Image (cartoon, grey):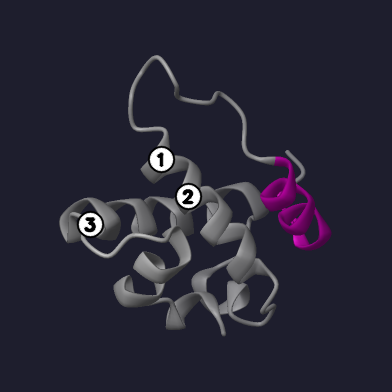
């Protein structure tokens, strides 16, 4: 599965929820993709060239969706997502 193939139904299954706010899930998915692109310097098409980046995006999405309260929000990307994106990072500035 590539990043562009991630659907909201798949996200719900991944997060283990049956009844999520689809607007919030869409926003989190979009933000997770943009964070992966910004961090790595890859385009959306280039993200799709590496199927393991899908797990990085899902990890970011999970953090965004489950840590939506200011007192529980993380300030750093989770280690799994960061390690995967580091393998393909072209953004060294």
**Label 3 SS:** loop
Foreground label between 2 and 3: 3
Residue displayed at 17% across by 56% down: 23
Residue displayed at 31% across by 76% down: 9
The residue wearing badge 2 is: 62
Could you give the CA–CA distance between mark 2 and mark 3, rounded to whole angstroms?
13 Å
The residue wearing badge 3 is: 20
Above or below 86: residue 75: above
Could you give the CA–CA distance between mark 3 and mark 1, rounded to whole angstroms?
11 Å
Left or right: 40 in relation to 9: right
- CB atoms of marks 2 and 1 within 8 Å: yes
The image position of residue 89, as x and y in percent, is 75, 56
Residue displayed at 34% across by 51% down: 28
- Residue positioned most to the top: 71
Q: Earlier in the sequence, mark 2 or mark 3?
A: 3
Above or below 93: residue 87: below
Secondary structure mostly seen in the magenta stretch: helix
Along the viewing direction, whichever of 82 and 39 lies nearer the viewer: 82
The image position of residue 24, as x and y in percent, is 22, 50
Magenta segment includes 22: no
The image quarter containing residue 75 is top right
Query: Which stretch did the figure color magenta?
Result: 79-91
**Label 2 SS:** helix
The residue wearing badge 1 is: 66
Q: Quick one: label 1, few (<14), some, or many (20+) residues within 10 Å?
A: few
Quarter of the image with the C terminus in it: top right
């Amino acid at each position: 599965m590539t990043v562009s193939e991630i659907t909201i139904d798949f996200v719900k299954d991944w997060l283990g929820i049956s009844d999520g706010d689809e607007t919030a899930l869409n926003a989190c998915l979009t933000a997770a993709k943009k964070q992966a692109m910004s961090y790595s310097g890859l385009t959306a098409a280039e993200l799709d060239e590496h199927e393991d980046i899908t797990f990085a995006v899902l990890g970011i999405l999970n953090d965004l969706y489950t840590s939506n309260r200011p007192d529980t929000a993380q300030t750093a990307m989770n280690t799994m997502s960061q390690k995967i994106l580091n393998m393909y990072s072209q953004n060294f500035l």
